[in-house]
Image (cartoon, grey):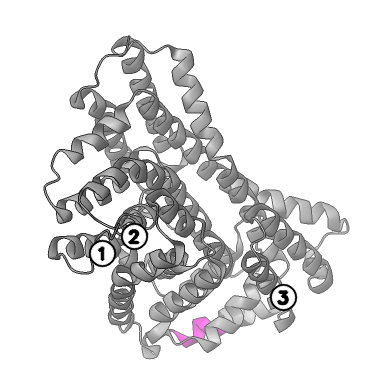
Amino acid sequence: MKKNVRLFEALIPVIVLIALLIINVNVYGDSATSGPNQLALFISGFVACILGVSLRKISYKDLESVAIDSIRNSLQANLILLLVGSLIGLWILSGVVPTMIYYGIQVISPKFFLPTTCLICCFVSLSTGSSWSTGGTVGIALIGIGHTLGIPLPMVAGAVISGAYFGDKLSPLSDTTNLAPAMAGANLFDHIKYMLITTFPAIVIALILFLIVGLKYAPSDINLSNVEEVLSVINSQFKITPFLFIAPIFVLLLVIKKVPALPAMFLGASLGGLLALIFQPHLLDTNSYKKIIKVAADGFSSESGNKFVDSLFSRGGMSGMLSTVWLIITAMFFGGMMEACGYLQKIATTLLQFVVGTGSLILSTVSTCILLNVTASDQYLAIVVAGRMFRTAFEEKGLAAINLSRTLEDGGTVTSVLVPWNSGGAYFSGILGVPTLSYLPYCFFNLLSPCISVIVGFLGIYIKRRTD
């Protein structure tokens, strides 16, 4: 028979995980995500398992079953990651990414690069409803442009992510934007309208911060000879033509048409291989099929002789995403074990004891979403579990459902990308090539959204009451 869960018992696996992650960062630095952190999650998951078997008398088979179901929920994300790896490699081989970088360097001013990057990603994500598709297409090109202009990559990644998640939150095409009101019992378009109260100030402040930070990188500070050399090398290595913009436009149209992510990414990668045959035959071996498959599997290897260009374009491939896939699988194993033992529920329900008013209720909801992103490692679980937990509490306080749906997005959707082992953090770190903890301080929108949500709650402004 299961015993009541004690809070200290529920926190033991979390404490073990945090301790191991701190040790890994100190010992391995940025390479901690290439194995050590995965093992930390695996070890912490087994700590939860041992506690569940010994203290809660839960059978190992039951624990394993829940953990495997948790991993199964992440399979779509892992398949998308593998296809995005192939897409990146083939888009470099075909000249799509080099073309986007080549024209982008000449058009975008270094002084306004960061806010421009954020706005571009806002527009693309709002149109597609997908932060992941935005990061995997225009995001990788903007990283390359920023790298060429000498702007620190963590700043560029922060601008990409801020814009991508702004559009993701407000687009009716977004899965999380539909999931949050569904869990709260709110109307979709009322939810979007009400989210503007916290989302719009967050993106305005973020753009101002990006403008202030970006002003440091004036055109006079850029080494123009290096930029010209990079443009020359790109032009000599690839055939640059506006026709190659067909690929990103095609993928964005597929997403706008609500084609599922997997076939959209597959078709985008396939188009990249076709464009390579048409525009870059000089980069293909005598066996074109063999070259295309190798790039899709292992990524593109640039051999221009220019170290900067070679580091910029030597990336992609399914194999380049395997450490990220490994990270997500072990994170979901840990989250599954924590859920099966009842530890996630215990930690979250403990927060409800401190709720005394609207402000503390919203703070508890946001905190629970962030905690679930850290422990369950998935933004969908954060929204679903927190939504189920707090829906009754919001009703008892006489608050309309859109207050909860907005809070779920402010706390759950945007913070997933800030956790290295969460599916969101692992994905963006993998495709942008920037460690999560490096870009975290520059994800201004993602950091501001939950803070503004809590402030609005404590001030009691724009809090809609129930009318039924």
Q: Is residue 223 visible?
A: yes
The N terminus, quarter of image: top left
Quick check: 267 above or below 420?
below
Q: Which residues are magenta?
A: 222-228
**In the rendered structure, which disc, 2 or 1, sits on the residue that comes first in sequence?**
2
Instruction: Tell me the distance, in whole angstroms, between the alpha carbons under discs 2 and 1.
Output: 8 Å
- CA separation in Å, label 2 and label 3: 39 Å
Query: In the image shown, does 288 or 157 lie closer to the viewer?
Result: 157
| Residue behind mark 1 | 464
Q: Quadrant of residue 448?
A: bottom left
As for residue 427 lying within the magenta part, the answer is: no
Name the image quarter holding residue 199. bottom left
Residue that mark 3 sits on = 246
Secondary structure found at label 1: loop
Residue 157 seen in the current view: no
Residue position marked by numbered label 2 in the rendering: 402
Q: Amino acid at mark 3?
A: Ile
Q: Are marks 2 and 1 in contact (CB under 8 Å)?
A: yes
Q: Residue at x 70, y 83 (%)?
A: 242
Q: Quadrant of the C terminus?
A: bottom left
Q: Position of residue 40 (x, y in %)?
A: 37, 32
Q: Give the number of the mark in front: 3 or 1.
A: 1
Residue lying farthest to the front in this orientation: 468
Kindly report the secondary structure that dominates the magenta region of the rendered protein. helix
Residues at discs 2 and 3 in contact (Cβ within 8 Å): no
Q: Is residue 290 left or right of residue 218?
A: right
Question: What amino acid type should be assigned to the residue bearing mark 1?
Answer: Lys
Which mark, residue 370?
none
